[in-house]
Image (spheres, rainbow, N blue to C red):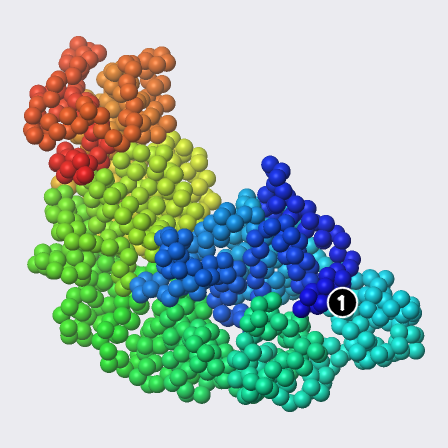
Amino acid sequence: MTERRTRMRRTLVERETELAIVDEALDLLAGPAPDGGGALLAFSGPAGLGKTTLLAELRRRAHALSCTVLAARGGEQEQSQPFHVARQLIQPQLAGTSEQELRAALGSWYSIVGPALGLCAPEQGAPPDPQGLRDGLDWVLTHLVVKRAPVTLVVDDVHWADPESLEWLAAYAPRAEHLPLLLVVAYRPDELPAHADAFRTLPGRAGQRPLSLAPLTEPAVAGLVREAIGDHADDAFCKEAWAVTTGNPFEAVELTAKIQDKGLAPVEASAPLLRDLAAAQRGSGLVERLERLGPSTVRFAWACAVLGTAIPQDLAARVAALGAEEAVDATGRLRDARVLSAATEEPDGGLEFVHPLIATAIYRAIPDALRVALHGKAAAAVIDAGLGPSAAARHLLETHPENDPWVVRVLREAAGENLRAGAPEAARRQLARALLEPPDFDERAAVLYELGCASLLTEPANTVNHLRAALAEPVDDPALRQGIVIRLAQVLAHSDRLAEASESLAREIPHTHDVRARLRLQSEQFMWDAFNAAETDSPARSRRLARLADRLTGRDLTERYVIGLRAWDACLRGEPVDVVLHHAGRVLEQGFSWAYEDRGFEVPVLVAMAHMYADRPGRADELFEAGTAEFERQGWRGAHLSFGYSLRAYIRFRRGRLAEAEELARAGLQLAERVGRGTPVHWYTIAILITTLLARGRTDEAWELAREHEFGRPFPAAVVFPDSQTVYAELLLARGDAKAAAAELEEVDRRLTPRGIQNPAWCPWQLHLARAVAGVDPERARALAGDALRRARAFGAPSAIGQALRVAAEVAAPVDRAELLREAVALLATSPAGYELARALAALGTELRDEELLARAVVTARECGADGLAAEAAGVLAGPGGGPSLVPLGEDRLTEGELRAAERAVRGEAVPEAHVPPHPTGEPAADPHPNPHSDGAADWELSTACRKLGTDLTGLSAALAAYGR
């Protein structure tokens, strides 16, 4: 082995430029320079140009500089084995670590990345999504790099890396320059998959492109020949050696070895013989040379070619049907013939081919029928060796269907392992192959169902076909049939086909005789109907839901899901807040996870959002914080986490914490972009971010965001909150296009009113329409605002009433405005809606020309991050800094005064009166924050406490109790 490595180092000719770049990168990585750091290098070139030799030298030099070296190699036969390359890189660094130590080292990522890296078995439960798994691998590698810096990570033959590892590495690669990490890859440019294009254009020291290796020149090949044979090799002989190898370093080195073996005289007369010698290194010539080694050696070589890389000798012997001694003899002959070598310097490290070109040539030389049979034998041998179904599955993918139940079973087991490990695409390939075997008649529906589950994220259209085919099969297991129907509805709903989702459930419900199973299907149908913006008979569905939910006790998860849907429906329809909170509270009397394996997260989200609309955003925030923590623990870092961040942003918006809302919304958008534009989560995120930017006074930025993300018609079929079309109309209104805004809002009316959705807290379309038409039809504007105010009062949330009062004042006759605004401020003062309070204060202060109210509006707007509103209110003040000096809201912790004010309000005690400035006309000024327990007293401390705790007065007692904990 040492001799071979020495020879390889000697043959690194005409690679001075590449080695200089390597040395520069390694010196920067390992040196003390303050600007030193990582880099990303890529070497590309056709097969045989010396990429592997160059990387071997790079690893040697990295070791010499005391770098930690992580190395892996893609394999032509292992491409279908998920995380094959990732395991090679990371697993050796953690080998020999106990489970306890692994759990401590990986923390919350243990159960997410452990199965993918082969460090532990997948746990039961919902698997991580691919993005969550990639984030986990990012964390593990970054942790290793920081802990064992400096690190050199080398991946050879990256074009043959499995898709899961390759996509992860391509996304991770740009981070190298910001870490003590030199990441180096080598690949054949014509074979690099499209999803690895990141390696073609590289940042930093690679000069924005990979380093392409060139063939050796004629003098370089002559040097190799003379180094091996002697300086007496004449020029004509050396020139022919260069010509027949085309300057390919691998072929040139192999040719010199054969010249030595043959004892060929290096003279011009021998030059014509070189072409035949060179041909013997590849294709049919290599096969003929192999056949001369004997039948048992040929079979052993074939078995090794089927097994791939790091080949256990005993496993290859079994596949080749050789005894132990025969296998040892065959190994010796193949090593002497420079076909095989040791994979590592470890005695039990297995075998590998001297070069991938040899492996490919031998593999392709195996007769087709025999190659298929060898893969079948390899699968059985792998299982018997205890390597597991996932290792066997890649061989079974190469076999022909033979109606073998064992094959179906192994493929299903492998798919289950890969699905739970976060490799759904690998599971999909395995189940698709199992379906071709085919499975037994009574097993076919189960395989189709599993295939649908595996392809859910990547191929929703095919998933629908698989699940419908499963339903067409005779299914004796009721639980399986129910699972198929629920999964079909789920994928239809997530594909924006909500009506079809509901219909699929409706068809199954009458044929489901088990009461609990029927209730589960009903709950799923109620849920997707609730999200269907085009539902035709929403009022009737609401009545059925109310009758059903009101008689349920919440004894199991299904009943609580139904009750949760009832709470949400009551919220949409504007039933009293007490009704909404009563049903939402029933749901949460017991633990209510957001990550049940066989449930969606929609109902937990709806229950939390019902609290927000009912003026309990603090409680909603708590629920979302717990829910997103569950998502992260599960490794759900795609759509789930994006929804979590985006809706938490909306909660912060409703609380008047606009800077926090923007930050969360942008984090949600970053995740949504990874999921894909046009998806439901993308609509949610953009709508929330636009709403927040408008509140912050950045209309132009909101408009550019909408244009960039094509936010506008056509709007999604699913219910989105805030309602996308209403948000778009609000954007148009902010830009001064009242006519276009009115047209959009009229359509919102036609869409929501027949459904009975009339809660302005959820969708204030009437208020926006009132503002849009006020200039051309003031009477209609007042009627719209009045109807919205009536609906808001019926719902009973102070923030909704306050908003409706403010807009009603905006479109009212001048004589009526002050009274409406006084009530708005009074209600909003003890609500959690800080931004709405700031708007009402600004409107009342402007109406009354009251500097103290305007100053309070400025401070409240600044606390909220509503910069545009703060500037507008400040502009109305007489001179810069007009009005009293006020203390900003500050952190969430209550001050002693705020806590006392809240406790007094809960006990029903009166609060001290605050000074209220006189009205400019000489009349008493309106009290901006009348306390219900005092006669006209204003208690700003109580107002601040409500906003910090995220509740109105009716929820203050519970919020204080939670605050105390």
CA neighbours of label 1 inside 10 A, class few (<14), some (14 to 19), many (20+): many
In the image shown, does 728 or 774 lie closer to the viewer?
728
Residue 729, horizontal then vertical, whole percent: 34, 41
User: Splitting the image into 4 quarters, where does residue 445 fall?
Assistant: bottom left
- Tell me: residue 866, above or below residue 874: below
Say which residue appears at 19% left-offset and 24% top-offset. 896
Q: Position of residue 900 (x, y in %)?
A: 15, 25
Q: Is residue 222 left or right of residue 460?
A: right
* Residue 160 position within the rendered picture, expressed as x and y whole percent measured from the top left: 58, 67
Q: Nearer the viewer, residue 618 or 462?
A: 618
Residue 41 seen in the figure? no
Q: Residue furthest top?
A: 922
Residue drawn where x is 45% and y is 62% of the image: 96
Dot 1 falls on a residue whose secondary structure is loop
- Up/down of 14 relative to 726, above or below: below
Left/right of residue 217 with respect to residue 871 in the rendered view: right
Counting from the top left corner in percent of width and height, residue 418 is at: 41, 68
Label 1, on which residue?
248
Residue drawn at 41 percent across, 34 percent down:
699
